[in-house]
Amino acid sequence: MAPNASPFFNFNMNNHAVHIQNNVCHNFNYNNNTSSISLFRNRLKSIREQFVAVNSHYLRENIIESVNHFSPSAFIRKEKTENTWLSDMRTVSCMRLDFLRKVTIKQNMREKMELWQQKKDEMSQSRKFDISFKPKFQRDEILVKKENYKIIFDQIKKRALIADEQAISINHQQRSREICFKAVLTKAVLIVNVLNSYFNNQQLVLNVGKQIEDYYSMESRLDVLKNIKVVEEAPLIAAQSLLKDLTLYKNNVVMPIQAEIETSKAQMVKKKNMLHLFSVNKPAEHTVKNVRRQYVALVKNNKVLINNLTNVKKLPFVKDPTTKIFRQNVIKVINTLVNTISTTNVTHLTDKYNKLNALLSGKLVCVANTRVMIGENKEALAFCMETLATKIVNYAEEVICVKTQAAYEIATIITKLWNVHQQFGKILFATMKQKCPLLVPFYYPIAKYLNCEQIDHESFGYKIDSLGNVESDSKYLQRMTGIIRLYASLIVASSRCNQPVIGLSHAWIFVAGTLNQNPVADITATILVEFLKIVGFAMHQGYGNQFIKLLQYINTHFLKKIILVTPEGNGGPITRLNSFLSRSLCTGSIEEPKGILFDF
């Protein structure tokens, strides 16, 4: 309620003001002290405003004490403490109202909880045996089930009554004869079906000859027995006799002839395909996973890899004059790192790997006062990978061909780099295949060539200068030997890793593919003996006796083909291959290469 609208407030306030005015004015002279009167009026005005504020705060029922009890002197003494009094009164009123509100809420909640609990108890007691509380679709379902149960129960009762009224007498002897007759007839039909499948072979029918009539008579006897409806003792004996005759005919007449025919077919297949020695019994599945899929992928992707390598060499970055100094520094760093790889100690190999890995990762590398950092330039990274791959292959052609130990050293570093940088591995693999097409036996056409003078030198990877001069066979074989050794070392080093980049199946594909081609003088024997010396031990561990069969085939059949195409006086590679095969087959094991490294 507004302060000015309360008559009670106005009455008290006016009386209070008059009382103060009468008592205070008695002590002052209004005529002589006009300034004191104005101050007094201002004071009365402030007192009135304070009473208005008090009345606006409290409720209507709050009793305001009459101002008649206060003397002017007492009012003046309490002037400084009236704000404190108002604050205390306000706090007490708020606490009282809050307490009343909480009590009311608790009482209402208690009443609602009691009502809900009462309804819950009533519903739980009434729902146990009454389905009226369930939803409509559940009530209908319960009623339908009850009706179905009644119908089924009535049907069972009727059937029981009918069975009691019409008791059926069963002839157990007749029933047992029927069961035996059916079982014997089923076995006879199965044997006849097997014999009919055998007789689809015209060669078998000719070998059986006159005895085929016996089979036809037994087949007619079977047709007669199939039409019998009432089984007596005689048909059962006839069926058992027929089953015995069919079994003897199958075991003594048909099966031996069928076995002879299959044996002759197998011998014909062996004559046509002499590679059965290592292709019939496949190695364990975990050692040659996806060999066929890898071979198909190798055939399809070889040209794609080489085309991608050509595209990398044609990048604008390679011919950009502004990057000439940078390219020279990259080549200098790579040449220095690759040329200084050796097995002096583990720390040395780790240092070379860390620097090459940092270079391919775009980090700063400092070698021989030359600083290089590729950063995030993709063309510079491709150029760096191609340069490193080319340098490694050149290193194989110049150093590994003379020193086999160098292949083991660099193969360990390459394997770790390949695991981290897959794109570098693909570029290196493509570079090796481009320089040495012998790594892909299906790729080079040798079906109609017999010696080195008649082959297509360009397809085999011979170097041809601008004048058309072809490099000598000795230099060519020396270069191919280095690349083959590097390839074999990569397979061995990779097969010992947790995640091999070139699995042992690549070795089997390479050897089998080479044996499926016609041999070339000097070249075929050289690549086989160099490859098997390094990777033969790992292949024997992985493939076991299957690899020994492969060596037996090379020794007994393929070596003769190599001798036929090799001119007189060029028997060095043949002698080394024959010595390796003889030593391995005599001992039944392959000598492990010395100095090979698996990790550092």
Image (tube, rainbow, N blue to C red):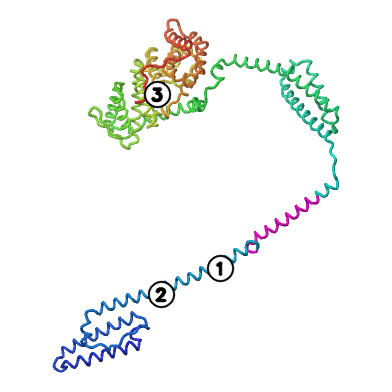
- 281 shown above or below 355: above
Which numbered marker is on residue 118?
A: 1
Which numbered marker is on residue 463?
A: none
> Neighbour class for label 3 at 10 Å: few (<14), some, many (≥20)?
many
* Badge 3 or badge 2: first in the primary sequence: 2
Q: Amino acid at mark 3?
A: Ala
> Neighbour class for label 2 at 10 Å: few (<14), some, many (≥20)?
few
Disc 2 target residue: 100
Q: Nearer the viewer, mark 3 or mark 2?
A: 2
> Neighbour class for label 1 at 10 Å: few (<14), some, many (≥20)?
few
Dot 3: element: helix
* Badge 1 or badge 2: first in the primary sequence: 2
Instruction: Give the residue drawn at x 77%, y 26%.
Output: 188
In the picture as drawn, the residue positioned furthest to the bottom comes out as 31
Q: Amino acid at mark 1?
A: Gln
**Distance from Cα at disc 1 to Cα at disc 2:** 28 Å
Q: Quadrant of residue 231?
A: top right
Q: Is residue 156 magenta?
A: yes
The quarter of the image holding the N terminus is bottom left
The quarter of the image holding the C terminus is top left
What is the span of residues highlighted in magenta in the rendered image? 132-158
Disc 3 target residue: 493
